[in-house]
Image (cartoon, grey):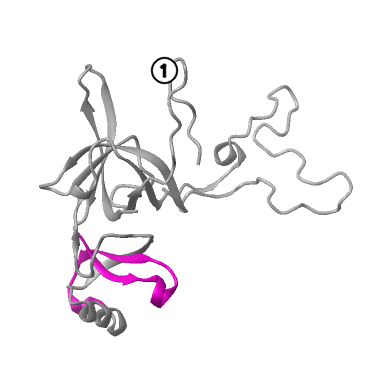
Amino acid sequence: MKGLLARKLGMSQLFNEDGTVSAVTVLEAGPCRVLGLRTKEKDGYEAAQIAFETLAEGKLNAPRAGGFKKAGIDPHRHGVEIRNYAGVEQGQELKAEMFAAGELVDVTSTSKGKGFQGLIKRHKFSRGPESHGSMNVRQPGAIGATDAARVFKGVRMAGQMGNERVTARAYKVVRVDAERNLLLLKGGVPGGKGALVLVRQSSKPVKAKGPAGKPNPRKV
């Protein structure tokens, strides 16, 4: 497993060899520093703590500043722990060049907040009839059971949409700009411009191509 913290810069497009255009998301991936390591002997599991975006020491509280001082690296704004991260050492610098074009990665970020939304936008419900006298064009139908005098938990209703931590899997790395620490991923990545993004080696296997030469559906 390998991964980086990145900053979403926005979207762009690339021209392919066949003349088609692909939409890509541009991520400023790193440089990150390895703040600490977890081992099975001491902690019961293997992981690496990754820090991203340097900042002034005075902007951190004493416990956080002490952790960076103990590790011998400059203070950083963000940090994350990635399980099963192997092949790194404490204080090592990680850059976008650890990934290569053609690789598949998983992306974790906070999705855009849409505010309070109804059933049609939030859950893709169909509208009601629009005939004369209809009173439920965009309203929900029955939400209760046939015999229980209550509403069960988990019923899809109106409410807050977006602004939640989501993971999108199997993004293809289209291009890596090692000089500027940029990763170009095919498609749109969750989150708005400037969002903090965690990019990890994909854990979603892809089946071999079928008899007709077309790829079979992916599975987790």
Query: In the image, what residue occupies the spot 26% across and 60% down?
Result: 87
Q: Position of residue 76 (x, y in %)?
A: 23, 69
* Quadrant of residue 196 within the rendered picture: bottom left
The question of residue 54 being in magenta is answered with: yes
Q: Residue furthest left?
A: 179
Mark 1 lies on residue: 213
Q: Residues within 10 Å of mark 1 (few under 14, many from 20)?
A: few
Amino acid tagged 1: Gly
Q: Position of residue 81 (x, y in %)?
A: 36, 65
* Quadrant of residue 73 within the rendered picture: bottom left
Q: Residue furthest right?
A: 147
In this view, the residue in front, 18 or 123, is 18
How many numbered circles does the render carry? 1
Q: Which residues are magenta?
A: 32-60
Query: In the image, what residue occupies the spot 28% across and 84% down?
Result: 62
The question of residue 61 being in magenta is answered with: no
In this view, the residue in front, 85 or 75, is 85
Q: Residue furthest top?
A: 212
Query: In the image, what residue occupies the spot 21% across and 56% down?
Result: 30
In this view, the residue in front, 68 or 44, is 44
3 left or right, relative to 146: left
Q: Is residue 149 above or below residue 213?
A: below
* Quadrant of residue 125 within the rendered picture: top right
Q: Is residue 172 above or below residue 45?
A: above
Q: Position of residue 40 (x, y in %)?
A: 41, 71
Query: In the image, what residue occupies the spot 21% across and 29% down?
Result: 14
Q: Secondary structure at mark 1?
A: loop
Q: Position of residue 60 (x, y in %)?
A: 26, 77
